[in-house]
Amino acid sequence: MKTWTSCETRKVALRLESSITNASFIVALNVLETVSGLLLPLTRILQSVSYDTSQAMVHVSGLIDVLENIRSEGSEFTVVFKKASDLTKKVGVVITKPRAAQRSVYRKNAGVGSSIEDYYRINVFYPTVDAIIVDLKHRFGERQQTATGISCLIPSLMDFGIKKQEQWKSLLAVIETYHDCLDVTAADLHGEFELWRKQWQNSEERPQSP
């Protein structure tokens, strides 16, 4: 496209080439590849036809722990940066730090006096991981975790043994959280809960949805 007769097309092609061969873009692309690999198992679970919401929350908590660990340890970025460096060599680009003022009157320039790897660790890797952690905690926070207690109404997930009281407590927490949306008391719902359990207790085929 850079050799096409259209002047506008050549300009667009050159701008695109400049963008995708930019060192910051290549580093960011490798960071996203690494983080996306960590998110993949959870996304598959959440998109499955019959997934256990409680189990999904366990996976979310585990994912957040992993992300926080690689955020604090920093060794994962060394591997990412090495992959990015190898990729830039293939396209004939050298990873350098963008020009920045040594002194700023507005805010501190992150990573100005650091190595090239540390600069991208501070300005690309940390913000990306932090943003995903914050988003996960927002989407799957305490209120959402409480709401998963309603999954005990799904016949295939009901426990008819010692966990009966645990499941009722989980459901009760949901009732207390969303009591403004319900026109019944906890006692009424407990009665319905017991009748619903009795209906499926001796059934051999229990639906995977309420």
Image (cartoon, rainbow, N blue to C red):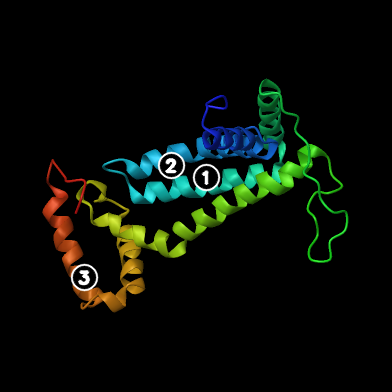
Query: Residue type at mark 2?
Result: Leu
Residue at the top extreme, as displayed: 90
Residue 90 shows in this picture: yes
* Residue holding disc 2: 42
Residue occupying image coordinates x 30% and y 62%: 168
| Secondary element at tag 1 | helix
Estimate the spatial distance between the alpha carbons at disc 1 and disc 3, rounded to whole Å. Answer: 34 Å
**Dot label at residue 210:** none
Circles 1 and 2 in contact, beta carbons < 8 Å: yes
Q: Amino acid at mark 3?
A: Leu
Mark 3, other Cα within 10 Å: few <14 / some 14–19 / many ≥20: some
Q: What residue is pinned by disc 3?
A: 189
Q: Position of residue 34 (x, y in %)?
A: 57, 35
How much space separates mark 3 and mark 2, taking CA atoms?
32 Å
* Residue type, numbered disc 1: Leu
Taking the spot 34% from the left edge, 73% from the top edge, the residue there is 176
Count the numbered circles shown: 3
Disc 1 to disc 2, C-alpha distance: 8 Å
Q: Earlier in the sequence, mark 1 or mark 3?
A: 1
Are dots 1 and 3 in contact, CB under 8 Å?
no
For the point 33% across and 67% down, the residue is 174
Disc with the residue nearer the chain's start (3 vs 2): 2
Q: Which residue is mark 1?
A: 63
Q: Residues within 10 Å of mark 2 (few under 14, many from 20)?
A: some
- Give above or below for 114 relative to 110: above
Percent across and percent down for residue 107 are 78, 63
Q: Residue at x 64, y 32 (%)?
A: 21
